[in-house]
Image: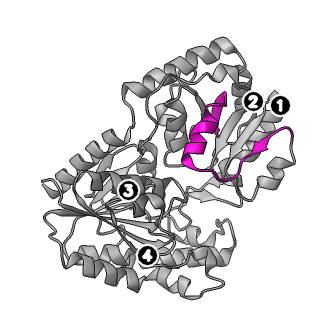
């Protein structure tokens, strides 16, 4: 049965990362098909895209968890957001669970598990897209930030709680443990959820032992909104680009070392705590955060994309954006995007933190003949089955219909 109504839940009403980008694109795209779409968010402002669309936006106007020092109430509504529960309850009184889907994208900073619990109480089907690992892991990454290694501890076990794996401090880690337990026992996340969307097989495999055994999993790649045109000409350029937050878990220090060994110029599209370090080394350039159209424009001037993350990113949308323009990527094999790469043919996969392997790849891409072959292959492979927004929405509607059916 095709849904008549969809409620999308995310922390933010403007793009701050890949999860919100997908949530907003889905909301606007679904509304354009005639479905009644409501977007429930905690943190503003409302993006121009949403405000100019047919999507009904309910913004709670709350603060991010990082702002808790200035507003103690943030700590409370991160555990149980009463305002979000009331807003959801009011919404659901007008809707039919037989024709409505509740679709969750983000909930770990402010919105909490309260609106999800409200939907479950009223018998509405809830679908959860696994953009990260916050459903189970207190720090959301299965990653030990102080040691810069993937964490293999069982979430919420004694060894997990006892280990300070947080990027800030141990007190923050303990608060994360409490908020994870609050979502679990107050919000019933994930223990009563039945439907999940995975964006990669590796991320679902990592999460599956901690999710309900009777859950149904669907796989749906994040959408790429680049139209098909003639491929870019990466052979004409020198820079290797890295897109995203400039932070240690992104493997940027490994990339900087490999670039030094291979005499490679880097273009960093993003911002973060390592910006000063990056700007103080070599001939590299940092743009700061820019709009999505500007990211796409900058991709036209690079030779290759690097995703050197140390943590197991669930996907990596920038790899798809680059592939759509015929620009290959070097990706660590712990990232979900690595599943899409045929090593040496449509890109390269390297172990996380391996400077030698990454430097070898950076040397390899200096060969124009190699680049021409790989660029053509990645462009052809992407457009054989593109991750367009239209294709994404078509598959998403099929998932909704299966849930409601």
Residue 216 seen in render = no
- At 39% across and 37% down in the image, what residue appears? 387
Are there few (<14), some (14-19), or many (20+) residues within 10 Å of tag 1? some
Is residue 292 rendered magenta in the image?
yes
Q: Residues within 10 Å of mark 3 (few under 14, many from 20)?
A: many
| Residue 310 can be seen, yes or no | yes
Looking at the figure, which quarter contains the C terminus?
Answer: bottom left
**Mark 4 falls on what kind of element?**
loop
Whole-percent x, y for residue 91 in the image: 26, 76
Asked if marks 1 and 2 touch (Cβ < 8 Å), the reply is yes
**What residue did someone put label 3 on?**
129
Residue 116: percent from the left, percent from the top? Answer: 33, 73
Name the residue that disc number 4 marks: 112
x, y percent for residue 48: 47, 60
Marks 1 and 4 sit apart, C-alpha to C-alpha, by: 45 Å
- Where, by quadrant of the figure, is residue 163 drawn? bottom right
User: Along the horizontal axis of the image, is 101 left or right of 99?
Assistant: right
Question: In the image, what residue occupies the spot 51% across and 37% down?
Answer: 321
Position of residue 82 relative to residue 137, above or below, is below
Quadrant of residue 118 within the rendered picture: bottom left
Q: CA distance from mark 2 to mark 4?
A: 42 Å
Distance, label 4 to label 3, CA atoms, is: 15 Å
Q: For marks 2 and 4, give the one nearer the viewer.
A: 4
Q: Quadrant of residue 84?
A: bottom left
Magenta stretch in the rendered image: 282-308
Label 2, label 3: how many angstroms apart (C-alpha)? 35 Å
| Residue 317 spot, x, y in % from top left | 50, 43
> What element does badge 3 sit on?
strand
Q: Which residue is mark 2?
A: 359
Mark toward the start of the polypeptide (3 vs 1): 3
């Amino acid at each position: 049965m095709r849904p008549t109504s969809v409620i999308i839940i995310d922390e933010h009403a403007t793009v701050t990362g890949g999860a919100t980008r997908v949530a907003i694109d889905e909301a606007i795209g679904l509304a354009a098909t005639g479905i009644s779409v409501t977007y429930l968010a905690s943190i503003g402002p409302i993006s121009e895209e949403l405000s100019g669309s047919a999507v009904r936006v309910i913004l709670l106007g709350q603060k991010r968890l990082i702002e808790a020092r200035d507003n103690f109430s943030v700590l409370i509504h991160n555990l149980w957001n009463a305002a979000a529960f009331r807003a959801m309850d009011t919404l659901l009184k007008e809707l039919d669970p037989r024709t409505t889907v509740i679709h969750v994208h983000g909930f770990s900073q402010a919105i909490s598990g309260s609106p999800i619990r409200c939907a479950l109480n009223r018998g509405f089907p809830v679908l959860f897209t696994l953009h990260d690992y916050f459903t189970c892991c207190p720090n959301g990454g299965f990653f030990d930030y102080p040691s810069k290694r993937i964490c293999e501890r069982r979430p919420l076990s004694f060894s997990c709680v006892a280990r300070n794996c947080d990027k800030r401090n141990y007190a923050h880690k303990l608060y994360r443990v409490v908020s994870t337990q609050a979502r679990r026992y107050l919000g019933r996340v994930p223990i009563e959820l039945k439907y999940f969307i995975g964006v990669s097989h590796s991320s679902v495999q990592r999460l599956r032992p901690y999710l309900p055994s009777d859950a149904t999993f669907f796989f749906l790649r994040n959408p790429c909104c680049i139209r098909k045109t003639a491929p870019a000409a990466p052979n004409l350029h020198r820079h290797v680009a890295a897109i995203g937050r400039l932070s240690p878990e992104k493997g940027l220090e490994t990339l900087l070392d490999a670039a030094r060994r291979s005499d490679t110029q880097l273009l960093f599209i993003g911002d973060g705590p390592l910006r000063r370090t990056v700007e103080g080394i070599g001939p590299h350039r940092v743009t700061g955060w820019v709009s999505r159209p500007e990211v796409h424009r900058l991709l036209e001037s690079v030779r290759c994309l690097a995703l050197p993350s140390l943590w197991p990113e669930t996907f990596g949308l920038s790899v798809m954006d680059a592939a759509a323009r015929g620009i290959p990527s070097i990706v660590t094999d712990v990232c979900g995007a690595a599943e899409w790469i045929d090593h040496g043919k449509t890109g390269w996969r390297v172990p996380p933190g391996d400077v030698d392997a990454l430097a070898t790849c950076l040397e390899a891409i200096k060969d124009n003949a190699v680049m021409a072959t790989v660029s053509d292959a990645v462009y052809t492979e992407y457009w054989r089955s593109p991750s367009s927004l239209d294709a994404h929405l078509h598959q998403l509607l099929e998932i909704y219909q299966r849930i409601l059916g």
